[in-house]
Image (spheres, coloured by chain):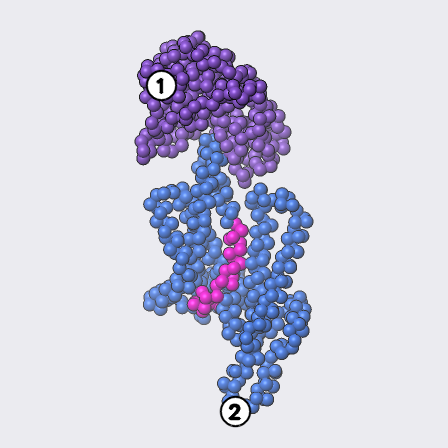
């Protein structure tokens, strides 16, 4: 077990490092660069400036040296990173670490909530559909799940935004929380804290619903298929003959064995959704990771781009890592000892 | 067949624990009604091991399931299965309410069935299987687990090791024996076994069969052993019933079945039994194929394959006593020696 843990951790580090290296060079291959972006900006705003002046202004604004040879940039990037410094964002004028630390909790909050809700709804719906396999309820739910699963989340987002925010005015059109609410997380001021949390949920409600609308169907269909398979297993028949209570059969026999194959994909999904929320965050002007990634891309902001990519990679890698290490705990057949 | 009760003196001389009368199991299908158990009568005596043999699709598993009223949907079971408990009470298994049936199964009659190797929840340790069974039936877990440990030792398993294992950590033979222990943990009176050895190798089959005989003696069990393997069941059973096309064609003590089988099908089965000592030319496959449950031949269901068949075989034969302990449903049983027995099966 110890050896497996070590090996697995080593793999994690290597994966993150490899992706970091790969994205570093891929981003440098994009046409244009931060210098071009700033130059274009300066020329547009100061038509009277000479080329020399502009070049000097550009160099002054850029504290990284985009014109250094690639390997020099790479070495300095990696050594900075190992010290926890992801560099200075060119477009936002703040350290990348700070921007990500500010944005990530919001993305994690609304994506995490959405995934959890979708998972719970999907698993329950899938299990009920399997128990009633072939009934009208099952057929209708299957069709609904497939339809809802086939529409991208931003389409739901746009519909919600148009109908509920602009036409009916029931929900806010964007942002993390109302400008009138003071962010308070303080056990000594419970009323203010609760108001703040309520306001945050109110703002996140539409993006969360949009994601849930898409994601639940996938889980439901997966769970339905797995449950139907488990319901046909010999051990289920024996369990029924042994007179076990229905509840125990549903949870300990069907539920557990049907969810098992979906556990890993759920953890990986959380990782992917962190980066996959770009369009939803744009639609709802929700300043999370995806929002800053778009900013960085349009402004050729290498350090911020690298930072966001890196965080997404690390989350996915950690998701898989956690899934691998804990899978043995929930499925005795896959305990680490056997795979050696 | 319905005359069997009157004609079979063994039924009255011993104490039956299960009386099966007019048992039918039917499945409604698009192309007709499939009768997979056709009007079967059978007495199972307290303390005996009765073997039920038949080829694939002869209704063996359905008979086993119906003893616990556990025929899978959408099968319909009709008739009577009277269970006489040791304290003299009689109940009709097919008449029980859902809750009474839940209690009845495993407490009075339990079952080890086909596919024993996948009969355990793969994500649960063996101990939990025993504990949940005891809890579901309101038995004290402490003494119940002691009994489970004793049962496992009787089956030559190390109780602590087995109980702390997950199903995938046990071999096929160990799982099979653990399942027998699980079936006996609530001290049932009757143990029904449906092809319990089908997935095991020959050595393991033989050793499980001898274990079962010991277990029967120690725990005063009645056993119903259902198999396609005639030579195997003769090593264990006191009586053997031969099923053909969803009804019994012969029912007799093991010795008579082996030495003086009175039904052409039983003879054909014995002659078709592979035996290392018998020369190949003496082994006889049975010509033709088993009847379709939707469309069973009129009269004696075996007459289309039977070398002795005459016109009279278009009428349903009744069960006749050949000796005190042997009954057969055949019009020509007196001429049965026209079919010689070519192979010998040891008891």
Q: Colour of chain A?
A: blue
Task: Mark yes or no: residue B5 visible.
Answer: no
Residue at 45 percent of width and 11 percent of height: B337
The part of the chain drawn in magenta is A263-287
Residue at 56 percent of width and 45 percent of height: A330
Task: Mark yes or no: residue A237 visible.
Answer: yes
Is residue B325 one of those drawn in magenta? Answer: no
Viewer-proximal residue, A313 or A282? A313
- Mark 2 and mark 1: span between their CA atoms? 112 Å
Asked if badges 2 and 1 are on one and the same chain, I answer no
Residue for badge 1: B300
What is the number of the mark on residue B324?
none
Quadrant of residue A213 within the rendered picture: bottom left
Q: Nearer the viewer, mark 2 or mark 1?
A: 1
State the purple chain. B
Count numbered badges in the picture: 2
Quadrant of residue A73 within the rendered picture: bottom right
Element assignment for label 1:
loop
């Amino acid at each position: 077990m110890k050896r497996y843990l070590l090996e697995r951790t080593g793999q994690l580090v290597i994966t993150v490092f490899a992706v970091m290296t790969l994205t570093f060079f891929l981003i440098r291959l994009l046409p244009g660069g931060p210098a071009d972006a700033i130059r274009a900006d300066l020329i547009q705003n100061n038509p009277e400036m000479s080329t020399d002046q502009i070049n000097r202004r550009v160099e002054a604004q850029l504290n990284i040296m985009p014109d250094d040879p690639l390997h020099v940039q790479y070495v300095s990037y990696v050594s900075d990173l190992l010290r926890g410094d992801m560099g200075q964002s060119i477009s936002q004028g703040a350290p990348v670490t700070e921007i990500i630390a500010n944005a990530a909790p919001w993305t994690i909050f609304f994506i995490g909530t959405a995934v959890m809700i979708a998972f719970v709804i999907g698993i329950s719906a899938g299990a009920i559909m399997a128990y009633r396999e072939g009934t009208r309820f099952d057929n209708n739910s299957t069709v609904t799940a497939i339809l809802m699963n086939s529409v991208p989340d931003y389409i739901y987002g746009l519909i919600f935004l148009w109908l509920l925010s602009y036409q009916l005015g029931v929900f806010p059109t964007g942002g993390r929380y109302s400008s009138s609410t003071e962010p308070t997380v303080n056990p000594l001021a419970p009323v203010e804290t609760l108001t703040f949390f309520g306001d945050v949920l109110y703002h996140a409600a539409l993006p969360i619903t949009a994601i849930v609308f898409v994601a639940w169907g996938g889980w439901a269909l997966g769970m339905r298929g797995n449950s139907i398979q488990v319901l046909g297993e010999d051990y289920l028949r024996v369990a029924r003959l042994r007179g076990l209570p229905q509840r125990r059969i549903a949870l300990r026999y069907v539920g557990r064995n049907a969810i098992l194959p979906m556990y890993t994909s759920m953890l990986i999904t959380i990782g992917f959704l962190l980066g996959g929320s770009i369009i939803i965050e744009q639609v709802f002007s929700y300043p999370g990771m995806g929002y800053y990634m778009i900013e960085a891309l349009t402004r050729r902001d290498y350090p911020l781009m690298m930072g966001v990519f890196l965080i997404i990679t690390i989350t996915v890698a950690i998701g898989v890592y956690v899934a691998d290490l804990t899978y043995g705990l929930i499925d005795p057949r896959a305990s680490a000892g056997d795979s050696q | 067949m319905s005359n069997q009760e009157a004609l079979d003196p063994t039924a009255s001389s011993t104490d039956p624990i299960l009386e099966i009368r007019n048992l039918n199991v039917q499945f409604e299908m698009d192309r007709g009604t499939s009768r997979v158990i056709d009007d079967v009568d059978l007495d199972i005596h307290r303390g005996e091991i009765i073997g039920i043999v038949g080829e694939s699709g002869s209704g063996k598993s359905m008979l086993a399931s119906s003893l616990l009223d556990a025929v899978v949907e959408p099968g319909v079971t009709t008739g009577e299965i009277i269970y006489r408990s040791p304290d003299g009470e009689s109940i009709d298994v097919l008449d029980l309410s859902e809750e009474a049936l839940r209690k009845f199964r495993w407490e009075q009659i339990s079952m080890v069935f086909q596919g024993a190797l996948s009969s355990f929840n793969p994500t649960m340790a063996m101990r939990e299987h025993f504990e949940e069974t005891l809890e579901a039936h309101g038995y004290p877990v402490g003494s119940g687990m002691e009994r489970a440990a004793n049962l496992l030792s009787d089956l030559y398993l190390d109780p602590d090791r087995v109980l702390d294992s997950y199903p995938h950590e046990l071999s096929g033979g160990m799982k099979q024996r653990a399942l027998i222990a699980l079936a006996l943990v609530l001290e049932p009176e009757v143990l029904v076994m449906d092809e319990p050895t089908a997935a095991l190798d020959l050595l393991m089959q033989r050793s499980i069969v001898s274990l079962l005989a010991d277990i029967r003696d120690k725990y005063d069990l009645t056993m119903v052993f259902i198999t396609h393997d005639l030579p195997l069941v003769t090593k264990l059973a006191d009586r053997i019933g031969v099923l053909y096309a969803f009804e019994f064609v012969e029912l007799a003590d093991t010795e008579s079945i082996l030495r003086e089988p009175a039904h052409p099908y039983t003879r054909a089965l014995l002659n078709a039994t592979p035996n290392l000592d018998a020369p190949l030319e003496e082994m006889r496959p049975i010509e033709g194929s088993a009847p379709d449950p939707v469309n069973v031949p009129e009269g004696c269901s075996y007459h289309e394959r039977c070398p002795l068949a005459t016109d009279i075989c278009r009428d349903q034969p009744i069960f006749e006593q050949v000796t005190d302990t042997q009954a057969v449903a055949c019009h020509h049983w007196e001429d049965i020696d026209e079919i010689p027995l070519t192979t010998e099966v040891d008891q």
